[in-house]
């Protein structure tokens, strides 16, 4: 019996000795599948027995990082780093892949450099593309069937497209989705939803890939117009048209008014200038006529009498000029007055008076 027990124990003791020397380390748990968005980090754990000597990480068969028991991790690229965890019965090496790229997708392997002892998993790097509904807000009448188009561009892999109306999913039979290959291993999708609205609804197109925590979505509002509200709508637009017309007309009216005012003001200015000539001419003409009349009939003496003393006084004041006055005609005098009108009034007024004076004097003599 004792011999038999010893016979059984011997291999156990030998095994224990060998494992202690590191001849028989093993992988307790290999890495697990991971799906990440391009640009983010990917983490993989490899749990090995405490008697490990070396751990080699491979990406698609190429060694990317080595961890040596005596030295620690040997990193040759910024993109592949590692962390260590040790507990009472295992050692964990965690591989971290930074800034993941589509090309990182594939097999991730953990090897302890012993035959048959390797664990592997798969990394899937995905790309969150863009999503949009090509139609803007629509107004749809009763019994009208419409097509709404949703486009997904630059995804990896091709996204799964679904549709919702308000908060419930639309049956797959009501839309058709086509997938196409884009550039750089990316995928596009085009989904066309056909529906006949019976109410105003918010249509949402959702695109999903595994790496997204929530599907990406795009929405459009379809306004349903039934015949009853259609009348209101047209009335509304009718009154809107009236308002717009009123505004446009009043603006035009104001512009017209401004133009008229400008034209009138300009005309007045021109007339004022002209009127200086004309009044002077008329004055002169009237004076001439008066003179003639007085000479002929001697009737307006009473009117002239008022002038007489003044004119006489003027003449008396500057007797020198009176002698020159008779030479100039009345028309040239009025022109001279026009040119000097800006000059202080005292002198020019006298100027006008001089040529008139002699005739007045004559009138006086007549009266
Ligand atoms: C890991 O991914 C591979 C390839 O995608 C798949 O075949 C395998 O079943 C996955 N394993 C688990 C545990 O999901
Ligand atoms: C790896 O193991 C460590 C320690 O248990 C844990 O904190 C970490 O989340 C694990 N990483 C993965 C990718 O499972
Ligand atoms: C995916 O892309 C959309 C649009 O660019 C963005 O709004 C969303 O946040 C992205 N999702 C993640 C998880 O990065
Ligand atoms: C929505 O847009 C697509 C293409 O941009 C067009 O073919 C379709 O007729 C539009 N649908 C409606 C209801 O306007
Ligand atoms: C819509 O269709 C229904 C049933 O075919 C019909 O009774 C109704 O008059 C239609 N409405 C309009 C506005 O054409
Ligand atoms: C959907 O939502 C809109 C706005 O919230 C609402 O007016 C409409 O009645 C809803 N349609 C349905 C079918 O529930
Ligand atoms: C659409 O996306 C936004 C932001 O990502 C989110 O808040 C919203 O709940 C989503 N809508 C649906 C119907 O999933």
Image (cartoon, rainbow, N blue to C red):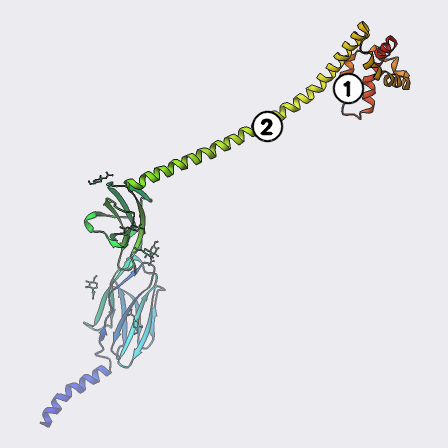
**Residue 98 location, x and y as percent?**
34, 63
Quadrant showing the C terminus: top right
Residue 39 rendering spot, x and y as whole percentages? 34, 59
Q: Position of residue 238 (x, y in %)?
A: 38, 35
Identify the residue at horizontal 32%, vertical 38% (top origin): 231
- Position of residue 97 relative to residue 47, above or below, is above
Residue shown at the point (83%, 23%) measured from the top left: 347
- Name the residue rendered at 41%, 37% in the picture: 240
Q: Which mark is residue 337?
A: 1
Q: Is residue 214 above or below residue 320?
A: below
Could you tell which of marks 2 and 1 lies nearer the N-terminus? 2
Q: CA distance from mark 2 to mark 1?
A: 31 Å
Q: Nearer the viewer, residue 322 or 173?
A: 322
User: Is residue 157 something one can see in this rendering?
Assistant: no
Q: Is residue 102 above or below residue 320?
A: below
| Other-residue count near label 2 (Cα within 10 Å), few / some / many at <14 / 14–19 / ≥20 | few
In this view, the residue in front, 207 or 46, is 207
- The residue lying toward the viewer, choosing from 238 and 222, is 238
Q: Which mark is residue 261?
A: 2
Residue 155 lies left or right of residue 258; in this view the side is left
- Residue 94: which disc? none
């Amino acid at each position: 019996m004792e011999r038999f027990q010893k016979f059984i124990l011997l291999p156990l003791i030998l095994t224990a000795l060998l494992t202690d020397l590191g001849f028989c380390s093993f992988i307790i748990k290999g890495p697990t599948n991971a799906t990440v968005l391009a640009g983010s980090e990917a983490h993989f754990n490899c749990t090995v027995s405490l008697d490990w000597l070396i751990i080699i990480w491979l990406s698609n068969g190429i060694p990317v990082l080595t961890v040596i028991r005596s030295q620690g991790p040997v990193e040759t690229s910024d993109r592949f780093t590692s962390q260590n965890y040790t507990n009472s019965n295992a050692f964990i090496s965690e591989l971290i892949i930074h800034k993941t790229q589509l090309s990182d997708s594939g097999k991730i392997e953990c090897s302890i450099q012993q035959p048959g002892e390797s664990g592997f998993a798969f990394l899937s790097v995905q790309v969150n593309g863009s999503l949009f509904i090509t139609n803007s807000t629509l107004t749809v009448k009763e019994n009208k069937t419409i097509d709404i188009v949703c486009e997904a561009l630059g995804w990896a892999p091709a996204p799964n497209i679904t549709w919702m109306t308000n908060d419930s999913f639309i049956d797959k039979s009501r839309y058709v989705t086509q997938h196409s290959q884009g550039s750089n291993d990316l995928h596009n999708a085009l989904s066309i939803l056909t529906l006949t609205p019976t109410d105003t609804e918010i249509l949402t197109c959702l695109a999903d890939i595994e790496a997204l925590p929530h599907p990406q979505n795009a929405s459009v509002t379809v306004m349903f117009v039934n015949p009853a509200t259609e009348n209101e709508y047209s009335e509304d637009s009718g009154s809107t048209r009236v308002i717009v017309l009123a505004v446009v007309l009043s603006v035009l009216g104001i512009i017209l008014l401004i133009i008229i005012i400008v034209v009138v003001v300009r005309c007045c200015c021109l007339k004022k200038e002209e009127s200086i000539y004309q009044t002077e001419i008329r004055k002169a003409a009237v004076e001439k006529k008066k003179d003639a009349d007085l000479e002929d009939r001697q009737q307006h003496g009473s009117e002239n009498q008022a002038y007489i003393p003044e004119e006489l006084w003027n003449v008396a004041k500057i007797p020198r000029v009176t002698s020159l006055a008779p030479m100039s005609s009345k028309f040239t005098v009025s022109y001279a007055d026009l040119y000097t009108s800006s000059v202080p009034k005292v002198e020019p007024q006298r100027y006008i008076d001089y040529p008139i004076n002699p005739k007045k004097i004559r009138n006086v003599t007549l009266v």
